[in-house]
Image: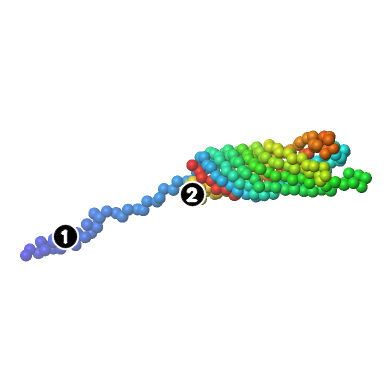
Amino acid sequence: MNLKLILAGALIAAATPSFAADLAPAPMEPVAPIVVPFTWNGFYVGADIGYSWTKADSTYGSDFFPGISANTSPDANGAVGGLYVGYNAQFNQIVVGLEADAEISGKSGDDSRLVDVGGGDFFTLNTKADENWQGSVRARLGYAIDNFMPYVTGGVAWSDWDFTHSVPGFGSIDTSDTLVGWTVGAGVEYAFTPNLIGRLEYRYTDFGDSSNNDLVDDGLGGLVNVADKVDLTDSTVRVGIAYKF
């Protein structure tokens, strides 16, 4: 056999694996998943529950005791809970929004005072305050850190109350009033998923005062004037969970 042919065949056989390796496809680089950043834009609706402390300062005066007024503090504490709805718009990390809420209330309080009317005579004044519901419409301003957002809030608040002032032996007077005031607060929100958002919030509210003048039967066939005024301020801590559309 020709020696040249043998050597050429050997060289071709030795080069074939390297040539085949050069023709093999290069391994694919792994593709990083596309992460869509969380956005606070959009409408949301949620439910909350909390506990509230209301400071109540009451002043009572009656023609039963001319020139004599009595002060009581029927501070009302209890649970509140309800629904809220709002909309957020995000500009870079700044989030602005508008929110409204409505809650039923279990707050109730009472107080009694012994009042000196002079000449060694005293009377006992009993005052009771019960809140039925409350609500608000507020602006919000937040700072988004991905899916975490601290915020401040403030706006107009409403509250509906029932009051009872009674003096044993001289009857009682019942009044109801819906008050309008202002509220401010702060909180934090955290998005557990793109749609599920939890929150913790504190708000301070000044509901203003309830003032009433009524003519009451004095039990002797006549009528006397009774005046009462109750000033109400409120602190509430709430937790909530919302669905963002």
Q: Residue furthest left?
A: 1
> Which residue sits at x=75%, y=48%?
110
Q: Does 6 appear above or below 210?
A: below
Picture quadrant of residue 19: bottom left
Q: What residue is rendered at 59% in x and 45% in y?
A: 82
> Reading the chain from its start, which is encountered first: label 1 or label 2?
1
Establish if 63 lies above or below 6: above
Q: Quadrant of residue 96?
A: top right
Judge by depth and name the residue closer to the eye, 111 or 165: 165
Name, please, the residue furthest toward the right.
119
Picture coordinates of residue 92, whole percent (x, y): 52, 41
Which residue is at 84% across, 41% downward? 69
Residue 161 in the image, given as x and y percentages of width and height: 69, 41
Mark 1 is on which residue type?
Ile
Secondary element at image label 2: loop
* Residue occupied by mark 1: 12
- Between residues 97 and 229, which one lies in front from this camera angle? 229
Label 1 environment density (alpha carbons within 10 Å; few <14, some 14–19, many ≥20): few
On residue 193, the disc is 2
- Residue 14 x, y percent position in the rendering: 19, 62
Percent x, y of residue 18: 23, 59
How crowded is the residue under tag 2: few (<14 C-alpha within 10 Å), some, or many (20+)? few
Residue at horizontal 27%, vertical 53%?
Answer: 25
